[in-house]
C-alpha cells in the first residue's frame, strides 16, 4: 500500500495494485471543439463516462482528506477499444453520427507503482436533426389519432435525431391508444424507419447546372445532417392489440388476507355496478364507488385505470393494492378485479427533535418529543384519525448558573382526514379532477410558558381541503402541484403577562402592543410546486402562503369580537433550487420573502399597529440566519439588550427577507455513515411595517435596506442516516445590524466581531431548507 500526497493536500491511497506493470489510476472524458451549452456538455460527458468498461474507470472512495483506490486493473488496450465502441453507440443514440473519439495514455512512476492516466477526447461532429416526421399506420383509427394529436408530438422538425425523444414519442402514442380503448396495444407494435439520404440525389442528372446544385445540396447536408423519420405499425399476428375494449364488471375484495382466497367471503353488496365482497364487515361498501374511475359500458382508458389504482394506493388503509383486467371470452368487454390487503388499523409513532445554539451572550437548547396515534380506518370508511401530543422545552444557561428551563410548551392535536372531497354539489368535479383530494377537520390546543415573561394558551380549529395533481402531460412537464385551503381557520390566544413582562412594557412602551392575545378568523391557502429539470441535475421548489383574517367577521357587531379580533393580510413566498454538481456535491440557493399588514379597520385600536406576535416573522436559529440565536435578529437596525429591565428578549417583524446559499460536499464515512460538509452564507432580517409600530430603525425603509441586512457565513457537518440527518452548523456574524447595546461598536461593520464573540453553534435535525 502506498500513500501519495498531492499539491492540494488531498492524497490517494492505492491498495493491492499490480506489481511491475502499469495500472489504471485515473480516466477522464472530455468533449472538445463543441459549441453546445455547458449543462448539455456535462450531461454528455457523464453519459460517455458511464459507457467505459468498469476495469478502466478507476473509481475512488472519498475519505476525510484522502481517497482510496482498491484493486486497480492493469492497463489493457482492448478495454480502451471496447469502451470507444460503446461510446460510439451512445453518441449515435444522441443523434451524433459524425463523431470521432481518440485517447491518450500517460504512465507516471510513483515509487514502485506505474500509474496510467487515460484521457478520451471526443469530437461530436454535427448533430443529425429530424427533417420530417410521418406516421404510416395501416389502421384508420390509429392513423387518425396520430394525425389529430400531431401538435403534441415530442419530436418535431429540427429536433435532434436522438433515441431518447423518439422513444418518448413511441410512449406517447402507446398512451394515446390505450386511453382510447386499445387496452392491449404494445410498444413493440410500432417501429421506426429513417433515412439520411435525399432520394432525389440518387437520380442521374445530365444538366451541368443541375449537377452543380445537387453537389451544393450534398455539401449542405454534410454541414447540417438531417434524417427523415417514419413511424409504422408492424404486421400483426394478433388483432386484439388493435381492438377497442369496453369496461365491464368491477369487483372489489377489500380485506384479502395472505392466507385467504377471494372465495372466502361472507359479505357481498353491489353499489353503482360495483360489487364489494368482504370476509368481515370491516369497510362500509358505500365508500368504494367514489374511488373507482372505471364505469361500466365506457371505452377503456388507461388513465382511468391508473387513477383508480393510484387512488386506492394513496388512501393508507391498504398496504397492498392489486387491480387486474380479464377479457370476457372473445368479446370486447373487460372485467376488473381489485384485491386489497388491509394495513394495520392502528399505528403508533414517536420521534424526537432538537436544536442547540451557543454564543458568548448565552446558550440555548431546544428539545421536543412527539407521540402520535393513528386510526387508518376510522368509522369503517378509510378515514384517517390522528391524535398527536407534543412536549417541547427550551433550556438556557446550561453552562451557567441560573434557571435552566426558559420555555415549556405542551400541545395536543386531533385531525380527521377524509380521503375525498366533502362538499355538496361538486359531483362533476370529483369525477373530472385528475388528482387526489382530502378533506380535513382539525382541532389543536397548546400552552406555552415563557419563564418570567408570559403564559400563552391557544386554541385552533379549522376545516380544510388538500389537492394534489400532476401536469397533464408528464412527458413534457413533470410538475407536482399541491394546494391546501383552510376555510374557516379559527384561532384564539389568551396571554397572561408575568411581572417581568409588565415591567419590561413600562420601561419600553413601544412593545406594549407586541405581546397581546386575540382572535383570528381567517382564510388560509398554501401552494407548493416541486419539479426537476430535464437533465435531472437541478431540483426546484416553489411555495407560497396567503392568510386573510377577519375580513368578514369584522362586520359583526359584538363586544368580544371588537375587543379581540385581528384583521390582517399576510403573504409569503419561498423558492429553492438544488444544483447537483455531481452525485456527491451540490449547490443550494434559497430565497424567502414575507409581509403582513394589520388593517386599519381592526376594531381594537391597540391591535392596529402590527400583526399579533404569534403570527409575525422571526429570524435566527438552526433553520434561518444561523449566525444568530432563535428570535435574536432585528427588527431592522434596532440596538437593544436582550435581557434587563429595558431589554427585548424576542425579536419579531411584519416583514422578512432572507436569502441563503449553501455548498454541500462529502467529507468522509464513519462506519458506513456518510459525513457531509457544507459552506454557507445567509443574508436577511425582519422589520416592522407601520411607522407607529416602532422607532425608525425598526421600520422597513427601502433607502436603508442594504444597511439593515444581516450577513452570516459558516461551515457545517451533516451525519446522514438516510432516514434522519443530524446537522451541526457554525456561523459567524459577518455583518450585524442589530447587536445588543454593549456591542454597538460592531454594528453594521464587516468582520468586526472577534471570532468567538461573533460566532454561533447550531444543532439541528434535517436540512435547514427545503432540500
Image (cartoon, rainbow, N blue to C red):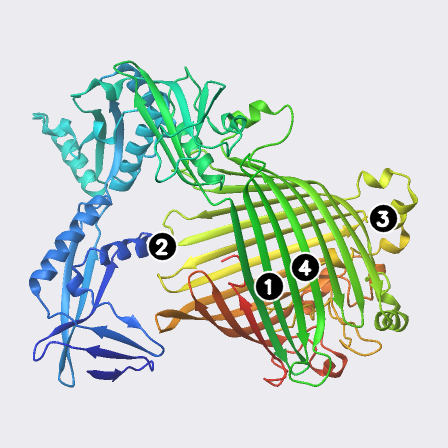
Q: Look at the image and tell me whether residue 488 can be seen.
A: yes
Residue picked out by circle 1: 369
N-terminal of the pair, mark 3 or mark 1, is 1
Near-viewer residue (393 or 637): 393
Q: Which mark is residue 493?
A: none
Give how far apart the Cα atoms at labels 4 and 3 are: 21 Å
Is disc 4 surrounded by few (<14), some (14 to 19) or many (20+) residues within 10 Å?
many
The answer to whether residue 568 is left or right of residue 351 is right
Q: Secondary structure at mark 2?
A: helix
Q: Look at the image and tell me whether residue 137 can be seen.
A: no
Q: How many marks?
A: 4
Task: From the image, state whether disc 3 or disc 1 is nearer to you.
Answer: 1
N-terminal of the pair, mark 1 or mark 2, is 2
Task: From the image, state whether disc 2 or disc 3 is nearer to you.
Answer: 3
Near-viewer residue (577 or 648): 648
Give how far apart the Cα atoms at labels 1 and 2 are: 44 Å
Residue 444 coordinates in the image, percent (x, y): 70, 50
Q: Secondary structure at mark 1?
A: strand
**Looking at the figure, which quarter contains the N terminus?**
bottom left
Give how far apart the Cα atoms at labels 4 and 1 are: 29 Å
Q: Which residue shows up at 47% across the image and 65% down it?
A: 725
Residue picked out by circle 3: 600
Q: Which mark is residue 39?
A: 2
Residue 304 coordinates in the image, percent (x, y): 42, 27
Amino acid at each position: 500500500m502506498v500513500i501519495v500526497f498531492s499539491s492540494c493536500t488531498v492524497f490517494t491511497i492505492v491498495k493491492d495494485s499490480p506489481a511491475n506493470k502499469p495500472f489504471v489510476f485515473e480516466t477522464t472524458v472530455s468533449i472538445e471543439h463543441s459549441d453546445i451549452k455547458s449543462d448539455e456538455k456535462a450531461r454528455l460527458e457523464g453519459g460517455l463516462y458511464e459507457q467505459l468498461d468498469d476495469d478502466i474507470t478507476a473509481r475512488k472512495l472519498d475519505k476525510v482528506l484522502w481517497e482510496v483506490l482498491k484493486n486497480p486493473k492493469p492497463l489493457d488496450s482492448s478495454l480502451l477499444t471496447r469502451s470507444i465502441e460503446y461510446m460510439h453507440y451512445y453518441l449515435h443514440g444522441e443523434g451524433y453520427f459524425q463523431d470521432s473519439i481518440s485517447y491518450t495514455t500517460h504512465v507516471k512512476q510513483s515509487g514502485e507503482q506505474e500509474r496510467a492516466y487515460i484521457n478520451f477526447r471526443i469530437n461530436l461532429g454535427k448533430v443529425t436533426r429530424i427533417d420530417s416526421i410521418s406516421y404510416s399506420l395501416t389502421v384508420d383509427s390509429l392513423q387518425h389519432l396520430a394525425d389529430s394529436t400531431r401538435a403534441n408530438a415530442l419530436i418535431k422538425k429540427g429536433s435532434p435525431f436522438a433515441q431518447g425523444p423518439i422513444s418518448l414519442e413511441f410512449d406517447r402514442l402507446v398512451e394515446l391508444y390505450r386511453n382510447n380503448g386499445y387496452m392491449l396495444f404494445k410498444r413493440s407494435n410500432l417501429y421506426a424507419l429513417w433515412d439520411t439520404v435525399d432520394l432525389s440525389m440518387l437520380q442521374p442528372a445530365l444538366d451541368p447546372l443541375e449537377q452543380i446544385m445537387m453537389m451544393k445540396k450534398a455539401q449542405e447536408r454534410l454541414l447540417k445532417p438531417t434524417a427523415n423519420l417514419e413511424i409504422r405499425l408492424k404486421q400483426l399476428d394478433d388483432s386484439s392489440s388493435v381492438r377497442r375494449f369496453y369496461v365491464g364488471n368491477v369487483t372489489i375484495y377489500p380485506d384479502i388476507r395472505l392466507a385467504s382466497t377471494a372465495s372466502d367471503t361472507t359479505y357481498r353488496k353491489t353499489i353503482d355496478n360495483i360489487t364489494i365482497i368482504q370476509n368481515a364487515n370491516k369497510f362500509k361498501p358505500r365508500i368504494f364507488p367514489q374511488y373507482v374511475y372505471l364505469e361500466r359500458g365506457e371505452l377503456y382508458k388507461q388513465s382511468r385505470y391508473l387513477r383508480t389504482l393510484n387512488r386506492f394506493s394513496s388512501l393508507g388503509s391498504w398496504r397492498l393494492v392489486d387491480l387486474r383486467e380479464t377479457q370476457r371470452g372473445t368479446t370486447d368487454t373487460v372485467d376488473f378485479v381489485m384485491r386489497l390487503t388491509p394495513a394495520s388499523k392502528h399505528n403508533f409513532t414517536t420521534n424526537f427533535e432538537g436544536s442547540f445554539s451557543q454564543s458568548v451572550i448565552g446558550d440555548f437548547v431546544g428539545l421536543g418529543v412527539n407521540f402520535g396515534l393513528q386510526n387508518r380506518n376510522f368509522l369503517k370508511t378509510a378515514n384517517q384519525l390522528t391524535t398527536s401530543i407534543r412536549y417541547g422545552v427550551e433550556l438556557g444557561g446550561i453552562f451557567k448558573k441560573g434557571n435552566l428551563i426558559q420555555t415549556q410548551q405542551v400541545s395536543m392535536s386531533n385531525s380527521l382526514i377524509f380521503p375525498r372531497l366533502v362538499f355538496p354539489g361538486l359531483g362533476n368535479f370529483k369525477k373530472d379532477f385528475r388528482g387526489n383530494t382530502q378533506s380535513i377537520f382539525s382541532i389543536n390546543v397548546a400552552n406555552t410558558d415563557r419563564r418570567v415573561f408570559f403564559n400563552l394558551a391557544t386554541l385552533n380549529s379549522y376545516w380544510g381541503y388538500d389537492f394534489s395533481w400532476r401536469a397533464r402531460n408528464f412527458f413534457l412537464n413533470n410538475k407536482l402541484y399541491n394546494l391546501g385551503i383552510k376555510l374557516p381557520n379559527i384561532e384564539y390566544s389568551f396571554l397572561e403577562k408575568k411581572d417581568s413582562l409588565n415591567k419590561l412594557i413600562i420601561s419600553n412602551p413601544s412593545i406594549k402592543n407586541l405581546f397581546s392575545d386575540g382572535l383570528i378568523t381567517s382564510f388560509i391557502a398554501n401552494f407548493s410546486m416541486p419539479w426537476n429539470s430535464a437533465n435531472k441535475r437541478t431540483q426546484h421548489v416553489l411555495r407560497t402562503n396567503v392568510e386573510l383574517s377577519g375580513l368578514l367577521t369584522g362586520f359583526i357587531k359584538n363586544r368580544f369580537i371588537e375587543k379581540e379580533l385581528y384583521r390582517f393580510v399576510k403573504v409569503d413566498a419561498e423558492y429553492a433550487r438544488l444544483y447537483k454538481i455531481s452525485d456527491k456535491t451540490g449547490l443550494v440557493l434559497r430565497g424567502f420573502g414575507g409581509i403582513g399588514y394589520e388593517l386599519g379597520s381592526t376594531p381594537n385600536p391597540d391591535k392596529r399597529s402590527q400583526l399579533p406576535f404569534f403570527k409575525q416573522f422571526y429570524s435566527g436559529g438552526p433553520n434561518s440566519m444561523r449566525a444568530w440565536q432563535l428570535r435574536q435578529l432585528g427588527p431592522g437596525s434596532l440596538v437593544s439588550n436582550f435581557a434587563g429591565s429595558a431589554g427585548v428578549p424576542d425579536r419579531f417583524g411584519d416583514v422578512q427577507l432572507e436569502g441563503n446559499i449553501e455548498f454541500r460536499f462529502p467529507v468522509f464515512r464513519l462506519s458506513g455513515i456518510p459525513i457531509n460538509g457544507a459552506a454557507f452564507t445567509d443574508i436577511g432580517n425582519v422589520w416592522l411595517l407601520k411607522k407607529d409600530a416602532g422607532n425608525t430603525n425598526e421600520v422597513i425603509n427601502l433607502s436603508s435596506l442594504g444597511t439593515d441586512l444581516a450577513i452570516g457565513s459558516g461551515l457545517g457537518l451533516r451525519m446522514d442516516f438516510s432516514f434522519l440527518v443530524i446537522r451541526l452548523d457554525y456561523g459567524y456574524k459577518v455583518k450585524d445590524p442589530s447587536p445588543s447595546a454593549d456591542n454597538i461598536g460592531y454594528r453594521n461593520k464587516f468582520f468586526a466581531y472577534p471570532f468567538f464573540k461573533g460566532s454561533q453553534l447550531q444543532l439541528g435535525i434535517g436540512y435547514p431548507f427545503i432540500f
